[in-house]
Image (spheres, rainbow, N blue to C red):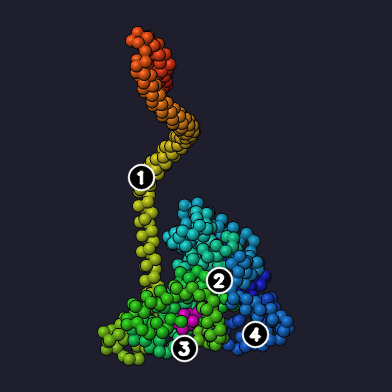
Amino acid sequence: MMSSRVRNIKDLKDRHNTINGDHLPSIKKTVSSGGSTAVEINKELWIKEPSDDNVDESTEESSVDSKLAPESLFPWKELEFLVHEGVPKDLRGEVWQAFVGVKTRRVERYYEGLLAEETNTEQSKEHNNSKAAPRKWKKQIEKDIPRTFPGHPALDERGRDSLRRVLVAYARHNPSVGYCQAMNFFAGLLLLLMPEENAFWTLVGILDDYFDGYYTEEMIESQVDQLVFEELIREKFPKLVNHLDYLGVQVAWISGPWFLSIFINMLPWESVLRVWDVLLFEGNRVVLFRTALALMELYGPALVTTKDAGDAITLLQSLAGSTFDSSQLVLTACMGYLAVTEARLLELREKHRPAVLVVVEERSKGGRIWKDSKGLASNGLRVDSEVDSLPDPQEHVVWLKVELCRLMEEKRSATLRAEELETALMEMVQQDNRRQLSAKVEQLEQEVADLRQVLADKKEQEAAMLKVLMRVEQEQKITEEARIGAEQDAAAQRYAVNVLQEKYEKAMASLGQMEQRVVMAESMLEATIQYQSGKAKALSSPRSVSSSVESPRRRIGLFGLGWRDRNKDKDKLSNDDSGTS
């Protein structure tokens, strides 16, 4: 369980005494140098650590654990269930520290001492041989820092400084491991979740306990785990492995990058965090095997359809990178492969470790291994040498697999190096164009300022135009109202003129009728006068008749013709008045 990685406080205090030395001793060295018995050590541990020596020890420990009170086991089962469901992201940093046992591991001022030692080394001009290795690691660290989660806001300039300090401190803490590619991603992930010093102690727990021997120069434990996983996958998925063998794909080509990177940059971010939750809780590498087997189960049917090695590896990388359902992955890994236990893995490791050690020993002695035209592995002896002098073929097969893993790792390193060179080239181009970019930025800023000024002027002009438009609208309204009033007055005047015209026409018509009547009256009067005058002529003499006739004509003229003349004068006056109006 999680506390199986927590070491006793006495060992940590003993480590504190070695601050001025090169690094803290490893857990195994501390136990062996202390001279204490296994019983004494188990008493100091919170929960006994499983032993790698033999399976019997683990059986004895399990029997002792079975004697614990039932109520002490129930919370662990509940906690295990909760961890499989996923640790809340707000609590993940603190929970991981508790799983690894950061508080128990922490030694006061040890981390500051490592950093101070690094500062003193940088300031000194002459370094002895013991300081040459840290300089080599630091150079590699400087190359890998820009590639660690590029673009993440937390890994800005300050974040990169923290990442640099954590990696350099660990390289000084454990020179047997120093620095290896992929550690930058481990430290970067931890710095995203916890403070700098806590990230250092968590990294110490992971690399020194969980992956002890994994990142050394020989990478013995990593090679052993590749052989163990190959045996497991041949046992679980024989059809898939036969197809991979037919394509010429080694299982280590697939599982090697997964295990060495602990699935970082191989799976989606959420899936990586869920796998790390279970990994840190269980305190061993079992979840690596289970997760790898779960991925093979999920994507094995697709791999069987591939036609060559390149397509198979590319397809698996693409499918693994799209495993966004982290719950399904963890459930398949933890519940579908319960038979893959730590005891089972210890047994398989003990089985394959001797072959790996033999190959590493032969390689360290400088023995040369080569392949003949038939692909058979042999050493640098002549063809006609005795058969007994040849090494065991099985050992050579194992060595070839290990060498293949190493070549794959070198290929991965070369790819990373190419990416690094590309990043460096881009940085050089950016540095060369920095002045031009600065001038361009200043020019753009000036243009933006001018545009803002023009925009402000335009806004002022628009405001003035709006005021003018409002005034014009008001004047138009007034003018329109005046026009409407004038039209109404003109209409009223036209109406009055029409009324007067009608009255005038009626008056003229009445006057015409009156004139006709006057004419008729005058004609009747003249006729009457003529009649009377003729009658009078017949009755009287000529003189009396003439005198009598003249007097009536004058009367008639005074009565008829004078009245008619007056009416004509009135008509002329009325016509003159209407013309002048």
Task: Determine the residue positioned at 73% across, 83% down.
Answer: 69
Secondary structure beneath label 2? helix
Q: Closer to us: mark 3 or mark 4?
A: 3
In the rendered structure, which disc, 1 or 2, sits on the residue that comes first in sequence?
2
Where residue 497 sits, quadrant-wise, is top left
339 on left or right of 438: right
Compared to residue 243, the image places residue 512 above or below, namely above
> Between 8 and 271, which is closer to the camera in this rendering?
271
Secondary structure beneath label 3? helix
On residue 61, the disc is 4
Q: Amino acid at mark 1?
A: Gln
Between marks 1 and 2, how big is the CA–CA gap? 47 Å
On residue 206, the disc is 2
Secondary structure beneath label 1? helix
Between marks 4 and 2, how big is the CA–CA gap? 23 Å
In the picture, the quarter occupied by the N terminus is bottom right
Q: Closer to us: mark 3 or mark 2?
A: 3
Residue at image mark 3: 236
Residue 298 image offset from top left, x and y in percent: 46, 82
Task: Determine the residue positioned at 45% across, 86% down.
Answer: 233
Task: Determine the residue positioned at 59% across, 58% down.
Answer: 112
Number of other residues with Cα within 10 Å of mark 2, as a class: few under 14, some 14 to 19, many 20 or more: some
Residue 39 image offset from top left, x and y in percent: 68, 81
59 on left or right of 258: right
Does the stretch in magenta take in 255? Answer: no
Q: Amino acid at mark 2?
A: Ile
Compared to residue 545, the image places residue 471 above or below, namely below
Q: Amino acid at mark 3?
A: Lys
115 on left or right of 560: right
On residue 436, the disc is 1
